[in-house]
Image (cartoon, rainbow, N blue to C red):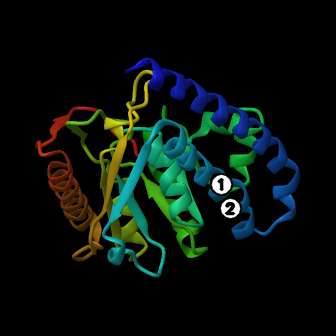
Amino acid sequence: MTTVQAIRTFLFYLLLSSSSFFWCILCVFIAPLLPFRARYRFVIQAWCRCATWLAKVVVGIRYEVHGLENIPQQPCVILAKHQSTWETFFLSAFFEPLSQVVKRELLYVPFFGWAMAMLKPIAIDRSNPKAALKQLAKQGHERLEQGAWVLVFPEGTRIPPGQIGKFSRGGAALAVNANLPVLPIAHNAGEFWPKNGWAKFPGTIQVVIGPLMHAEGQGPRAIAELNERAFNWVCQAQQQISGVAPQVSGVDASGVV
């Protein structure tokens, strides 16, 4: 990374952290007075748009979205590739309202966690996978019935470019039990916003929204088949984006950030 890009990256983090601190303080006092959808737009959507805008203007990370015609009118379960923090910002701003599966510990962070807690996240305990899956099934179904999208990162953690983690079946199970499709999403954000380190690289992220996938039947077999179909589509889309077939990682996925 060049000296100029390093300075831009430092400035980006300074602006991002400062805006986050002041915005979260403001939200703690204002958000409780707003209905849920307005609260989501005020707390999450506005700030996440600010974050992606800062990434574009300060460090040169732009993006292009393909497959907009695949987005349904009714919210469903989103199964997205996870490579960096960027897609968390982008997807939270792009789909609204959106309920995301997060680590329970995030809600304990002063101001940031308090603001997030008001937005109906599915906050699970990663140390208890069985309880986490039950919670995802119960609360995820409730969020879908309330008209919210449910975002699941089925790999369970951020996986570097060129690799793909095994998909947890939690998201597919949620979709099958709610009689709703899944919407797979692939991208290459990790090439410009890496998982490790603080470096940021200019470029254009390709976001590809796949076709809606419906389960063929009910029960464990239908869940497994839908999950495998979503996994295969994301693999193929990642290969088209990067030109290289991703290697399957052995990460134990739990479907959370």
User: At 56% across and 58% down in the image, what residue appears?
Assistant: 93
Residue 83: which numbered mark, if any?
none
Rendered position, 200 above or below 70 = above
Can you identify the residue that label 1 sits on?
44
| Left or right relative to 93: residue 178 | left
Q: Is residue 220 above or below residue 134?
A: below
Query: For the N terminus, which image quadrant?
Result: top left
Q: Residues within 10 Å of mark 1 (few under 14, many from 20)?
A: many
| Residue 191 rendering spot, x and y as whole percentages | 31, 36
Q: Position of residue 193 (x, y in %)?
A: 40, 35
Residue 103, by quadrant, is: top right
**Residue sitting at x 51%, y 42%:** 55
Residue located farthest toward the bottom when viewing the structure as drawn? 73
Q: Foreground: 112 or 203?
A: 203
Q: Amino acid at mark 1?
A: Ile
Question: To which residue does mark 2 refer?
Answer: 40
Contact, CB < 8 Å: mark 2 with mark 1?
yes
When asked about the image quadrant of residue 61, the answer is top left
Q: In the picture provided, is 148 more to the left or to the right than 240? A: right
Relative horizontal placement of residue 100, taking residue 186 as reference (left or right): right
Q: Quadrant of residue 46?
A: bottom right
Between residue 61 and residue 216, name the one nearer to us.
61
Q: Position of residue 202 (x, y in %)?
A: 39, 37
Q: Image point 74% across, 68% down: which residue?
A: 38
Amino acid tagged 2? Tyr
Visible in this render: residue 198?
Answer: no
In front of the other: 190 or 118: 190
Q: Residue furthest top?
A: 3
